[in-house]
Amino acid sequence: MGYAPTAGAALMLCAATAGLLSAQGRPAPPEPPRFASWDEMNVLAHGLLQLGQGLREHVERTRGQLGALERRLDACGAACKDSGGSNASPQAQASQDPGSEAAPETLRSLQMQLKAQNSRIEQLFQKVAQQQRHLEKQHLRIQNLQSQVGLLASTRPDDGVAKPARRKRLPKMAGHVGSAHNNSRLYGLPRDCQELFEDGERHSGLFQIQPQGSPPFVVNCKMTSDGGWTVIQRRQDGSVDFNQPWEAYKAGFGDPQGEFWLGLEKVHLITGDRSSRLAVQLRDWEGNDESLQFPVHLGGEDTAYSLQLTAPVASELGATTVAHSGLSLPFSTWDQDHDLRGNKNCAKSLSGGWWFGTCGHSNLNGQYFRSIPRERQQRKKGIFWKTWRGRYYPLQATTILIQPTAATAAS
């Protein structure tokens, strides 16, 4: 039929991939154990995605070939029936009589085989589609794990991570790995950037913190005359895809020294039950800057990480009706819709995850455009803050920072 060689090649590629994984899992005895690097994992994941796509294209092409062959057989059957009409000569009829009974039976047999083959190909197509979806999810998990490992790796002294001035150097671990958590608590890591500021730190950069009830993690602190701020988002060049699902926005993604999203759960751990100030810094393509600050309170996942906003700010972010006490604005992604539009999924219609009100007021996690698209519908998917440059102007850069106000009052 023409599909066996391609399927065989696909099976050989699968076997080769399995062999590669097996070879990486069994290093030579004289050499120390070696684990696959992130680059190798990304290459492998990309190869598996290409394999799934190739199998899918092959199945579709083979189905088309089988359909064409079936139509030719149908046409041949009709021709055979016509050839037995009264216009044929007696000699032709006599020459066709021996095969005239067998021809329809052969055609029916071929058609049954084609249908059975088509059914098997349909099952294979469904399996390939299922495997491709699974591989895409695995690829996303690899990216998220890579971001988390990058955050942990950036805590090493040779990576240039700043250390608090008052912190003592931790002793080298001679025991179990599990003792690292106890050491970090013993030497009292700061719980946020503001506490680090109160300890005398005045340089911005990457620091390790440990909010109450949380394991340590790395954040980007910006020290100003107002205290220590934790950077929770940065957009500047479009190097990171922000059109991510709920779990990615919960855990965080990207590079804290470049474009990144810290993670909703980490932000909630930093703020805890305290009220906070949220700072938004915007820049357009003409070099103009705008800075906004407003009080907020961030709820936990049980509230869809809702921002509790005062009435003026809630109106600016797209609340249709605002009570005197303000508004609780939940976070939304394309796979978890919590926005205020009952008949529309703002994250799916636009792009990225955000505290959407009615879709059209702000979205700092939208698609990054290096030039303004001509089509109005496309511009809606960009990064915008309506009350500054309008909904249809894609911004060049944004930064979002947060600072607990309770700690500020104590300073």
Image: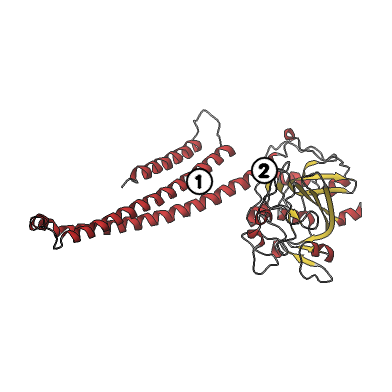
Give the SS element for disc 1: helix
- Give the residue drawn at x 35%, y 58%: 119
Q: Mark 2 or mark 1, which has the lower sequence index?
A: 1
Give amino acid for label 1: Leu
**CA distance separating discs 2 and 1:** 21 Å
| Position above or below: 9 against 344 | above
Q: Position of residue 238 (x, y in %)?
A: 68, 45
Residue that extends furthest to the top in the rendered view of this protein:
30
Where is residue 160? Give x, y as percent. 76, 35
State the residue position of label 2.
Answer: 239
Q: Which residue is drawn at 15% across and 58% down?
A: 102
Q: Can you give x and y, in whole percent of width and height, for residue 288 in the image?
A: 82, 46
Q: Which mark is residue 49?
A: 1
Please rate how many residues cluster around mark 2, counting C-alpha atoms within 10 Å: few if below 14, some from 14 to 19, many from 20.
few
Helix, strand, or loop for circle 2?
Answer: loop
- Counting from the top left corner in percent of width and height, residue 22 is at 47, 39
In this rendered view, identify the residue nearer to me: 236 or 400. 236
| Residue 191 in view here | no
Rendered image: mark on residue 354: none
Residue plotted at (43% across, 43% down): 14
Mark 2 near mark 1, Cβ–Cβ under 8 Å? no
Q: What residue type is labelled 2?
A: Ser
Residue at 46% x, 44% y is: 51
Residue toward you, 153 or 128:
128
**Which of the 4 image quadrants contains residue 158?**
top right
